[in-house]
Image (cartoon, coloured by chain):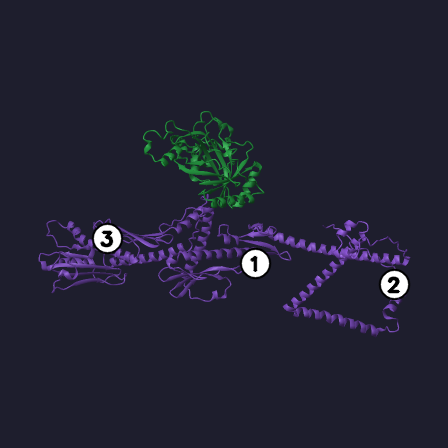
Amino acid sequence: MADSFTLPLRPNLEKSDRPDTLPVEIAQINEQWGGFRDVNEEVLLAKLAEEEERGGPLDSDEDGEKKEMDTTERREELYKRRAEITQFAMASHMETMFALDFISLLLSKHAPRQAETSMSAFLKQVAPIGSLNSEVVHPPPKPDSVNKDISTVSRGWRIQNFNSAANKLLGAASRLEKEVEAETKYWNSVLAIKDKGWKVCRLPRERQSLGVQYGFMEATPAFRDRGLASLRRGNDGSLVLDQGLVPSGLRFVRVRVKRGSRITGCTKPPGVSSNDAESIEQRILQARDSVFEDELFHELVREARAMASCGVTTRQNLIQIPAADGLEILLDLVDINDESLLAEQESSQDDVVLANGVAHSIRILLSFAHRQNLHRRTQVPLPLTPKRRPNPEYHLLRPALAYLQHISEARYLESFVHDIVSTLRSSGFQIPEFTAQMFSNWKLPHQHSSPSALEGLVASSLKPIESVFQGNLLAPNSSFTVRMRTNMSFPPFGTHYDVSFNLPSVPDLKSPGNLSLREEVEAAVSHLLLLDVVMKIASTQTDEEKKTEPDTPVKRWWDPIYPHMGELLLAYDHPEKHKKLRIVLSRDQLSLETCLVRCIDGIGIGAAEGRSQHTETKTWKLQQSPGIPNQQSSAMDFVTAEAST
Amino acid sequence: MHELLLFASVPTHQHAELLQQLAGLTAMQPRHCFERRLIFKAYRKPGVANARVGASQDLQSGDLQRVNKMLNGGMFYTQVVGPIQSADFADAGVTDAAANASANANPNPVNPDPDTDTKMDGMDSESSIPRSAYDFDQQSWQLEFRDIPEAGTRSAVTSRVMATAALPRGDIVPSMNAWGYSFVTEYLVEGDMFIHNDIVLNLHRVLHYPTNPGEENQPRRQMPTLQQMAPLEKSGSYVLQASMMVQDGSNQETMKTASQHLFGLREQLKSAVRLEMADRLSLDTRVK
């Protein structure tokens, strides 16, 4: 458009060759003022001032009134205006009807039938048909001056009309130019959005406007439909993201960790890059994030309600999950700009990490649930039935809860086994170290990047979590295994332990089977180790016997009479001198006690065993924190010493 | 189970465009699939058609009726359908070992383009027997029974009784013979599948095997190359089939819902293709 030409739209106004002639002006002044006698400067000024005064305040009064007008006045004004309008309309209607009657009456002379149809009833009554006639009257020829006036006036009218037409066209042109500018700006920003990879489409309900899809196709329908906002054009062509009635505030799901009554960890709101916070891209991202967070919280609440049996409670905007060992996870949806969030809390680094971990895991799991929805949606559907298919809750909290519970239980069990093994070691038993294999069923895929491998990784976290503790015992070829698995996805819920062992020296021992309390596992493991210790003491003699020559007299040695009670007996020829050794093993204590008993058979336990009245009781005890070397002799030395006396 | 259907014919030039439109509508990528379809025809074995032989008086009259109906009722053509992969087609460009390796590495190739290796095999491979990783003995099969569409329905969709059942793998002809079916012929269906809510959209065409003498009376144990297959419709046009399954055909409510879903889809696709019900007698599966 560089070589644009300008098209004159305004009529070419002819400058009148001369200003009004003096006689005309004199005549005008005479007409207006009644002669030159009264006209002087003061009078004219006064007149001007008066007009100004009358015109100026009037306008301002009106303005003031408009401002002050309240609703009732407005309404009255409205009614008045409406009445005026109707009045005008009635009047014009009446006039039109009169005109119609008049024309009809006039025509009725020549075409009575036709004219009759458009005549009013009143006219038909009062005037007979065809009572009015018309004739063409030739007006007398007008004088030249009148003709000249008429042509001047019509010329003036024409010029005026041309002027207004030109004004309108020019106005339209400038408006169009502005529109074009605005549209260019608008479409450029739409293209910029499209180039960034957002899906731009027509709105389904409003076919003429554009929308951008930022939501998640696989989300719950309510949230999927919220993922579409229209791209409106502002007055100046700027792009406006119109999300409809959705509140625009940015919110996020906050995860807090509570120990006892104190909040010890909390997730930070996601950072908003402030430098281009107002760019359209940023706003689309914000809208997407807030849809995601809203959906996340919606699904969390849905799942939390289903998990009420696990002690999860929901308030209007808060989910409380008791995890394990006084640990509580609080989830709520909060505004990102809420100042109260920034209040200082005493927080421990571990719990902040924990809170962040939970926050990330629920988001990853929601995305995973979306993927699963896609998989499910693209499978061949089941046949249609009248029953509605249930819409199961996503697994968001349950894996997180299972992990927390599992790790707490596993740590407890690990510390217990560690303690009891060190107790035995400090007592002089050479028990081999145990191995703990945490999360043994979680395996990292070989290819980290392929989508199916990642999905497999997340899917494995939805399965029951398993950890294995394994250790060898003192007796050769004997071992124990504790396999614990935690499951929150389907019943039976909670952590279950499977204790298995291989202890050939005690042949009739049966596995305790599936246990579900940590105390039971504790008891089972310590019982197993007690049996092992008993068997170790009993077998030491046989080992020694093999080494010594067969001709030496057989030494007396401990015989495990009640291994399950931890009792061994040193039989003697004299019935009064049977010696009994009782072993008690607990987490941090091993005690050996010997006494003389009379009766050894039957159910000779405790008070019924008939302890000798006059014999002294000897005990050996380990009661120290593991790590400090024992000052006393080892338990085996005590046993050997007791056997030889 | 009932099946409700609408069909549309899609000319070749519209095929690519419609694929894109359907992908947009259903928000999923097309799933390219090949299906071997074997046609079996029921025949009456001599001597078993009469239930009144011997001491048939012991039978309850209801049971007797049912047995008679089973033995003397209408007989149908049925199809045995086996899904195959594009890697199963013989391809002279792939040696046996390579084909095996690729089949092991990638047992489920996602939407393989059948035209990528058009130029790789020269036409001189006609003489040598093309090999592929296709193992006929591991081919899975499914029996598909389709009744003749119901007559006199008010609604403008094709609806018919259907049933599917899984069959053992491998050579299926002996089992089918034992059940009273004889092998007639086979063909291949190539197409793309989309899922739209409860509707399965199948954009497919029928391919014929190259005719080699002596192979007509039993299913092929080797697949020819894809390029050797000739479309049944010479122009290469496709058929779009929209189908919906209903568990209980006697439930008017669900049948109505299903046909309304199909009509909704027909409205949505109105500007692209015209979905309509098929001629009833062209879908006749009865043995005459």
Host chain of mark 3: A
> Mark 2 or mark 1, which is nearer the start of the sequence?
2
Q: As shown in the figure, which amino acid type bears the numbered disc 1? A: Asp
Disc 1 with disc 2 on a shared chain: yes
Q: Residue at x 74, y 59 (%)?
A: A94
Kindly identify which residue carries mark 1: A276
Location of residue A70 with respect to B14 vertically, above or below: below
Nearer to us of marks 1 and 2 is 2
Mark 2, other Cα within 10 Å: few <14 / some 14–19 / many ≥20? few
> Could you tell me how far apart the alpha carbons at marks 1 and 2 are, in whole angstroms?
66 Å
Residue B126 can be seen, yes or no: yes
Contact flag, marks 3 and 1 (Cβ < 8 Å):
no
Residue B187 at x, y percent in the picture? 47, 32
Location of residue B41 with respect to B15 vertically, above or below: above
A127 or A86: which is nearer to us?
Answer: A127
A39 or A482: which is nearer to us?
Answer: A39
Host chain of mark 1: A
Quick one: which chain is green?
Answer: B
Q: As shown in the figure, which amino acid type bears the numbered disc 3? A: Leu
> Could you tell me how far apart the alpha carbons at marks 3 and 2 are, in whole angstroms?
134 Å
Residue A132 at x, y percent in the picture? 82, 54
Residue A450 can be seen, yes or no: no
Mark 1, other Cα within 10 Å: few <14 / some 14–19 / many ≥20? few
Q: Is residue A138 left or right of residue B84?
A: right
**Mark number for residue B74?**
none
Residue A398 at x, y percent in the picture? 40, 55
Host chain of mark 2: A
> Mark 1 or mark 3, which is nearer the start of the sequence?
1
A150 or B230: which is nearer to us?
Answer: A150
Kindly identify which residue carries mark 3: A474
Colour of the chain lettered A? purple
Q: Residue at x 48, y 30 (%)?
A: B209
